[in-house]
Image (cartoon, rainbow, N blue to C red):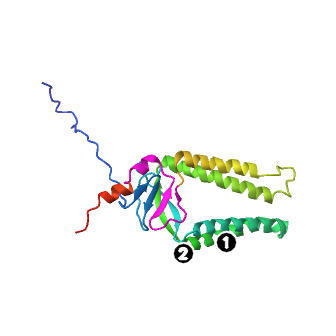
Amino acid sequence: MDELNPYAAPQAELEEIPVEIDGDTDVVREVNTLLMPEGTQLPRRCVSCNQPAVHGFNVWSSRLTGAALVMRVALVVIVILGVSFLRHAVPKAYEAFVLPMIVLVLIPTSYVTRRSGFVSFRFFLCGKHRVLRILTQTLLWSGVALVICREMARDHFPTAADDPFPGFLLLFFASLAVAHLFRVNVRPLMGRKNPYGFRGFGRAYLDSFSTIDESTSTQTPVQ
């Protein structure tokens, strides 16, 4: 018989306690797509690895068919027109002030457009995959900055590389590759609304939701 040590610290058996993660249960899975109604509160789990997460980010989906595509094309056109205006119509002494003005116009325009015709859903990432998402965004915007800065500096540095687009394409596809490999870029389905559809999730996160058939079979029929 083991002797008890009266001076030993008290011992307790530790049991694994399941972590309860909040979130609505009306999200359903359809192959690699998650369908959810407007106002859904998604669980605080990483969209890539399904671990508990606290870093949230918003993804916007259109209430109107084709509105998201129109907005994105319009923003690209505004940027191209702004750069063209910078190159041909503004004196060189004022070139540095035009690009910040374009950005200041784009920010409220994008905000008003999203508030009027778009609905926001908040997803979450763990610390590791949040860093990877920031990396994808940094690569993408570095490519955009490369093109813009090269256009602005063309007259001042004529010996520099003439074509910045190979560098832009390299950074663009590197951003896509990281986002696809680690599943950190949730994207909405065009033309799908109420329920809204999203893709780009990790397998563990997808499998944590019921399929449409499973969700229907578990519903209690109304008498």
Quadrant location, the C terminus: bottom left
Amino acid type, label 2: Ser
Which residue is farthest left? 1
Q: Earlier in the sequence, mark 1 or mark 2?
A: 1
Let me know if residue 203 is in the magenta part: yes
From the top left corner, tell me how far across and down residue 108 is, in percent.
Answer: 61, 72
The one of 174 and 190 positioned closer to us in this rendering:
190
**Number of marks drawn:** 2
Residue 147 as seen in the image, left or right of residue 73:
right
Residue at 54% from the left image edge and 71% from the top image edge: 64
Quadrant location, the N terminus: top left
From the top left corner, tell me how far across and down residue 33 is, in percent.
Answer: 47, 55
The dot on residue 116 is 2
Residue 1 as seen in the image, left or right of residue 122:
left
Residue at 47% from the left image edge and 61% from the top image edge: 122
Packing grade of label 1 (10 A; few <14, some 14-19, many >=20) is few
Give the quarter of the image for residue 117: bottom right
Disc 2 element: helix
From the top left corner, tell me how far across and down residue 104 is, in percent.
Answer: 66, 70
The one of 54 and 163 positioned closer to us in this rendering:
163
Instruction: Give the Cα separation between the discs numbered 1 and 2.
Output: 17 Å
In this rendering, is residue 104 above or below 188? below
Which residue is farthest top? 1
Residue at 21% from the left image edge and 33% from the top image edge: 8
In front of the other: label 1 or label 2?
2
Amino acid type, label 1: Val
The dot on residue 105 is 1
From the top left corner, tell me how far across and down residue 14 is, in percent.
Answer: 26, 40
Residues in magenta? Answer: 186-210
In this rendering, is residue 29 above or below 107? above
